[in-house]
Structure formats: structure tokens, C-alpha cells
């Protein structure tokens, strides 16, 4: 599978290093099925795919194979919220309770919408996790979040709202627009741009979705002596092993906590933090339309773009216990996820997927794959592709 001949698609001459890096991901870095797409100035300059969509059956990855992208979905959900703000329907600095009165309970009356987007609200976990079927039904989950007390004084810290982000921001979108976040995204973003990207997969598209394969980290924190763990990761290691840590509780808001994202029922529901399904092309095209005209459509005005990408939270993350940076809904570049420049913005997803835009270089990027490698520091796939884009630009 590492042979470059297995790679389909097109690359502009200048971006040939991206093809080389993509082929190397199959040969050396564990890709099974994957796609990468890069837009520049609103037009695709890289559009590649390869490998297998379903390792069980051998079904090949083709040009329109769909892939679940986990938290890269958050960028799409944030885009929907900013589009409503741009239209004057939503004030990000108004209290959430102005749009969702029930949310005012338990000390949350003054939390502005912006803090939901920037992970500063503190509503990261539930005292009583919601049965998964109820979470997929939407209303029981948002009712539980409305009643929940924050894990810290809102606005005094930030921590990654890994699961709850989508229901929190999504319910505001629903209250303001009268449509579920997935429906709003489909109507106002995906359809005008012709995106292959869904939050809530239609049954008609199920046959195009890849099957995910999971690889656990090679390093076992539970079995390792504490002194063998690098000092900067010891606090995180302790949190991973503590069932009552905020890290574990933030990803255990449903019962059972583990969600089968290969499940048709899960893929058909709306989990706007983590079950977006699309192509690398769809992800890159959305980001391209945030920074410039793409196919005759520009989603954000320059003023909205500046406001949406302004840093809101930076430093130690109360949940995942490593430094993070967020604007209002988008992840900003860090040493771990540098993107292609300091003005980039976007969102990574569990196991390696990534979507972002770089206004300075007029670049938009999307990478999706079905081998979910749970070893972020040692997973070089997205990093090598971004490095290749940076090399091409240079």
C-alpha cells in the first residue's frame, strides 16, 4: 500500500511534496485509507486519496469516500454559530440564557455564548451521565446540560469541552435558527458550497462511509513506573488513570461512556462536537470559503473572520492538562499542531484528522483517515502533510 501508484487524484506541480508525504503515510506511518485536499485562492491544488475504505471487506477508498472526523466537526459547528452572528441573529457576548432560558440554572445565568465556543464555560461534564439513546435523541442531553453546575467558575479558566461543546453550541444554534445544527449546516453552508460534509448522516449516504480501525498507544501509562513518564506528561497520566478526573468525566457524559462511532445510529444522529462525516475535499472547501471566495461563495466577511479567529483562551487546559489555544470555536496553532503559520485556525480530530485555513498563505487544508491512532505525539501523518504544504509554499 506504500507504493505511490496506489495514490489517486491530482496535485499542482508546486505541491508535489504533499503527494510524496501522503504516499509515505501509507508506507511508514500507518495509514490504511485516507484523503488529503488543499485549496489555495479558492481552488484545489491538492486532491488525493488512497488505500482501503473498509479493511474487513477490502472496499477501496475512492474519490467520494466519506470519513467520520471526530472533533474536526467542531470547526463546522463553530462556523454555523459565526454565520448566525454575522447575520445579526446571534450576539456572542450576550448571555446564553437570553436564547436558552433554562441554561441559567446553577450559576450559569451570566455565561456569554462566546465562552461556550472558547471552552471557558466550565460545563464539561455531567454529574449524572445521560443514557446514550437519550443523548442521540438530543433533548434529554441539552436538558441535563442546562441543569448542570459548572466544573469551575466560568470565565476564570478554560478546559476542552470535548463532548459537551456540540450540544451546548448546537442548542444555541437551534434556539436561534429554529433548525437543528446539522440541518442549519446543511442548508446554509454545505448546500451553497456543494460540500460533502454532514452532521447527522442521511441514510442514503451510509454506503459511502469508511470503517474505522483503532490503534491504541504503544505506551501503557497504567503499567509504567511513574519515573519513566516524562515530567510534562505525569499530570495527564495520573488523570487518565483516575476515573474521577475531569479529563475522564469530560469524555464520559453518556452511559456507556464509549460511543461506537462506526454505528449507523450514531452516525445518523447529531453530535456536533464529534460525529461530522465528510471528505477531505469538503473540509478544505469549507475553510477555503471562510477566508475567500470559493465557487462563488464566501461565508465570512473580513470583519467576521477577524472576530472569529481572535484568541480567547490560552495556556494550561483544565481538562486535557496540556497547553491549548482557542479562538471562539477554532483551535489556534501550537507547537503540537502548528498548521502553516501563526494566523492559521481550524480544528484537529481524534486519531489524526485535521481541517484548517491560513489567511496569510490563502490556504485551506483537509485530511481524513480511517486508522484512528491513539498516540498523538507519535502520529506523524497530519504533521508530515502540513510540513509538506509548508515546504511547497516556501
Image: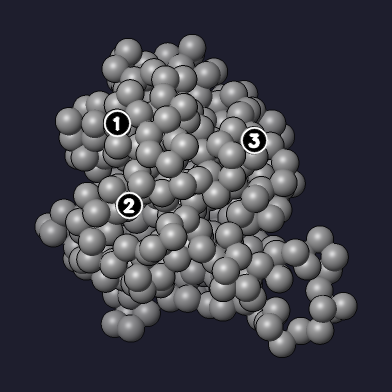
Q: Which residue is mark 3?
A: 156
Q: Earlier in the sequence, mark 3 or mark 1?
A: 1
Q: Residues within 10 Å of mark 1 (few under 14, many from 20)?
A: few
**Residue closest to the eye, 213 or 324:** 324
Depicted 116 relative to depicted 294: above or below? below
At a point 32% along the width and 52% down the height, the residue shown is: 144
Which circle's residue, 2 or 3, is located before the other in the chain?
2
Provide residue 54's location: percent of width, then percent of height. Answer: 33, 75
> Which corner quadrant holds the C terminus?
top right
Answer few, some or many: residues within 10 Å of disc 2's Cα (few below 14, many 20 plus, some between 14 and 19).
some
Q: Does 111 sit left or right of 22 as displayed? A: left
From mark 2 to mark 1, how far is it between C-alphas? Answer: 14 Å
Residue name at image x 85 percent, y 65 percent: 231
What is the number of the mark on residue 322? none
Q: Secondary structure at mark 2?
A: helix
- Residue 240 in view here: yes
Describe the element under mark 1 as helix, strand or loop: helix
In-front residue for pair 207/200: 200
Mark 2 and mark 3 residues within 8 Å of each other at the beta carbon? no
Identify the residue at horizontal 28%, vertical 48% (top origin).
143
Q: Position of residue 186 (x, y in %)?
A: 22, 38
* Alpha carbon separation for disc pair 2 and 3: 23 Å
Q: Is residue 150 above or below residue 349?
A: above
Residue 144, numbered circle: 2
Which residue of the protein is positioned furthest toward the front in this rendering?
A: 106
Which comes sooner in the sequence, label 2 or label 1? 1
Kindly identify which residue carries mark 1. Answer: 101
Q: Position of residue 230 (x, y in %)?
A: 83, 68
Amino acid at each position: 500500500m506504500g507504493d505511490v501508484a496506489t495514490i489517486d487524484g491530482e496535485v499542482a506541480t508546486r505541491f508535489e511534496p504533499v503527494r510524496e508525504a501522503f504516499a509515505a503515510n501509507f508506507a511508514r506511518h500507518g495509514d490504511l485509507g485516507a484523503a488529503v485536499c488543499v485549496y489555495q485562492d479558492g481552488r484545489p491544488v491538492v486532491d488525493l486519496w488512497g488505500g482501503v475504505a473498509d479493511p474487513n471487506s477490502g472496499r477501496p477508498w475512492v474519490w467520494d469516500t466519506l470519513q467520520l472526523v471526530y472533533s474536526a466537526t467542531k470547526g463546522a459547528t463553530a462556523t454555523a454559530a459565526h454565520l448566525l452572528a454575522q447575520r445579526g441573529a446571534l450576539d456572542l457576548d450576550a448571555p446564553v440564557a437570553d436564547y436558552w432560558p433554562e441554561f441559567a440554572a446553577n450559576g450559569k445565568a451570566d455565561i456569554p455564548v462566546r465562552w461556550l465556543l472558547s471552552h471557558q464555560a466550565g460545563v464539561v461534564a455531567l454529574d449524572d451521565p445521560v443514557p446514550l439513546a437519550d443523548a442521540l435523541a438530543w433533548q434529554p442531553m441539552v436538558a441535563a446540560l442546562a441543569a448542570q453546575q459548572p466544573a469551575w467558575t466560568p470565565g476564570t479558566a478554560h478546559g476542552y469541552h470535548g463532548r459537551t461543546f456540540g450540544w451546548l453550541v448546537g442548542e444555541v444554534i437551534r434556539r436561534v435558527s429554529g433548525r437543528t445544527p446539522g440541518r442549519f449546516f446543511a442548508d446554509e453552508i454545505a448546500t451553497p458550497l456543494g460540500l460533502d460534509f454532514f452532521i447527522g448522516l442521511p441514510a442514503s449516504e451510509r454506503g459511502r462511509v469508511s470503517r474505522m480501525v483503532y490503534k491504541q498507544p504503544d505506551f501503557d501509562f497504567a503499567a509504567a513506573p511513574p519515573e519513566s513518564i516524562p515530567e510534562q506528561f505525569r499530570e495527564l497520566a495520573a488523570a487518565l488513570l483516575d476515573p474521577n478526573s475531569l479529563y475522564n468525566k469530560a469524555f464520559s457524559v453518556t452511559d456507556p461512556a464509549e460511543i461506537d462511532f462506526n454505528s449507523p445510529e450514531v452516525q445518523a444522529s447529531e453530535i456536533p462536537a464529534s460525529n461530522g462525516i465528510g471528505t477531505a475535499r469538503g473540509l478544505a472547501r469549507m475553510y477555503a470559503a471562510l477566508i475567500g471566495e470559493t465557487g462563488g461563495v464566501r461565508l465570512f466577511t473580513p470583519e467576521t473572520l477577524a472576530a472569529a479567529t481572535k484568541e480567547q483562551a490560552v495556556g494550561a487546559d483544565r481538562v486535557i492538562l496540556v497547553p491549548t489555544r482557542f479562538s471562539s470555536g477554532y483551535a489556534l496553532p501550537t507547537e503540537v499542531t502548528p498548521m502553516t503559520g501563526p494566523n492559521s485556525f481550524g480544528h484537529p480530530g481524534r486519531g489524526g484528522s485535521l481541517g484548517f485555513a491560513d489567511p496569510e498563505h490563502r490556504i485551506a487544508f483537509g485530511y481524513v483517515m480511517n486508522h484512528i491512532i491513539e498516540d498523538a505525539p507519535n502520529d506523524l501523518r497530519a504533521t508530515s502533510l502540513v510540513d509538506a504544504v509548508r515546504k511547497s509554499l516556501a
